[in-house]
């Protein structure tokens, strides 16, 4: 009798954990955010390239030894700031030589004027000849022409002397120098350095003409100047300045059926760099009430994009159709009605239909 009771007790002890294992799994702790309705402007996305409004290649205009490089690479420079200094001695000597030649011409011209006046007086008194007068006239014209030639030579020599000091034609950020002190530079030396203006900057991007000129909802034409331009960097961060379209090309690319559009973007902190690739969002039309969810809640599989929502304490799959981005949020065009509890944190342990315990999401996720 005792032995039967002992066996029964052992059997119950063994069966107890087995029965517990077949019960409901433990609820997973998750963080949720409610699907929110908010006014969203219709946005069209493109890929654009940043470029400076002014970009100048600095070149030497006279040949000579480079005596000094007067800037620090990568610094901001102002228009008129000295950049390079070329040896001046030969060019200064050319100025003085041209000045001397001009003085000689002026002296010859003064003498020719006196001789012309004398020849005219003698001819008037019948003491001279017409030939002598004509020769004096020709001599005076030659000396006048020599003065003009020497004045031009002097001006050219002064211009060349001025070219020995190479200055910045625009304000902007200066790049690397391609030559250093002691090298011979000249018109054939190529680009010495480049200056690119910084604020504002241009962003150019190709746009489908149909997309740009018409709104899908209203079918009305859109004034390009009324379109807000927003940029997003390659790491996903949003640029904190809004731009404005200032140019739409006058022809459509036949190969891509797109028109080149240019926006003018403020760049007060230098965040935009010439040649940088960015994503461009154009906001057109009046804002409309749309549902948004955090992008951190999105999951993708072969069937598309979905989120987990908490329904009656369980994780339920909600298939979505997205309609763009709104900062850290995704705009939902189909799949949610608004107000659903969307799981954002703890997704790794969530399975369809599994019990969950919803809690407040951390502030860092909510505000990301």
Image: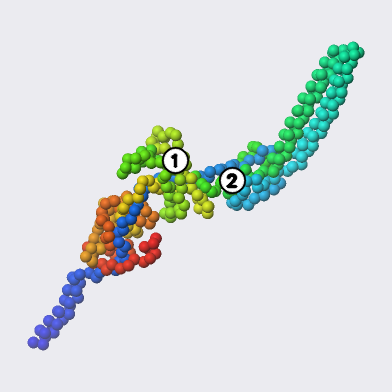
Asked whether the viewer can see residue 211, the reply is: yes
Which residue corresponds to the image point at 17% horizontal and 80% vertical from the top-left? Answer: 13
Where does residue 53 sit, x and y in percent of width and height? 53, 43
Against 242, residue 13 (above or below) is: below
Question: Which label sits on residue 261?
Answer: 1
Foreground: 282 or 46? 282
Q: How many labels does the image show?
A: 2
Residue at 67% across, 49% down: 70
Q: Which residue is drawn at 30% across and 66% down?
A: 30
Quadrant location, the C terminus: bottom left
> Tag 1 or tag 2, which sits nearer the N-term?
2
Considering the numbered disc 2 on the image, is that residue within a helix, a strand or a loop?
strand
Pair 2/1: label in front: 1
Q: Which of 48 and 130 is in front in this view?
A: 130
Single out the residue that lies furthest toward the front.
Answer: 124
Q: Residue 173's x, y, as percent?
A: 58, 49
Q: Quadrant of residue 355?
A: bottom left
Residue 106 in the image, given as x and y percentages of width and height: 82, 29
How is the protein colored in the picture? rainbow
Which picture quadrant has residue 86?
A: top right
Q: Disc 2 to disc 1, how far (Cα)?
A: 24 Å
Q: Mark 2 points at which residue?
A: 195
Q: On residue 295, which mark appears? A: none
């Amino acid at each position: 009798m005792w032995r039967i009771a002992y066996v029964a007790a052992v059997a119950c002890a063994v069966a107890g954990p087995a029965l517990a294992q077949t019960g409901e799994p433990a609820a997973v702790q998750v963080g949720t955010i409610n699907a929110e309705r908010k006014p969203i402007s219709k946005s069209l996305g493109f890929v654009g390239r940043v470029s400076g409004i002014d970009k100048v290649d600095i070149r030497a205009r006279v040949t000579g030894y480079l005596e000094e490089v007067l800037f620090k690479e990568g610094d901001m420079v102002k228009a008129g700031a000295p950049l390079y200094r070329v040896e001046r001695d030969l060019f200064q000597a050319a100025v003085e030589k041209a000045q001397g030649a001009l003085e000689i011409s002026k002296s010859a011209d003064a003498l020719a004027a006196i001789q012309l006046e004398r020849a005219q007086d003698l001819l008037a008194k019948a003491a001279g000849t017409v030939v002598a007068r004509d020769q004096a006239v020709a001599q005076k014209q030659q000396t006048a022409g020599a003065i003009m030639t020497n004045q031009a030579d002097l001006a050219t020599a002064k211009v060349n002397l001025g070219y020995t000091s190479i200055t910045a034609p625009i304000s902007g950020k200066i790049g690397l120098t391609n030559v250093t002190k002691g090298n011979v530079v000249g018109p054939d030396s190529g680009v010495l350095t480049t200056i690119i203006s910084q604020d504002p900057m241009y962003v150019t991007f190709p746009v489908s003409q149909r997309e740009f000129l018409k709104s899908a909802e209203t079918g009305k034409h859109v004034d390009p100047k009324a379109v807000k331009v927003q940029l997003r960097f390659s790491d996903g961060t949003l640029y904190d300045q809004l731009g404005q379209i200032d140019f739409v090309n006058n022809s459509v690319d036949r190969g891509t059926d797109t028109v080149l559009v240019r926006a003018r973007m403020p760049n007060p902190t230098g965040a935009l760099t010439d040649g940088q690739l960015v994503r461009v969002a154009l906001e057109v039309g009046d804002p409309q009430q749309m549902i948004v969810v955090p992008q951190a809640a999105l999951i993708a599989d072969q069937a598309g994009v979905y989120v987990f929502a908490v329904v009656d304490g369980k994780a339920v799959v909600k298939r979505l159709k997205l309609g763009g981005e709104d900062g850290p949020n995704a705009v939902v065009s189909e799949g949610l009605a608004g107000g659903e509890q969307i799981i954002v944190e703890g997704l790794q342990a969530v399975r369809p239909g599994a019990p969950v315990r919803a809690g407040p999401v951390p502030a860092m996720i909510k505000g990301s």
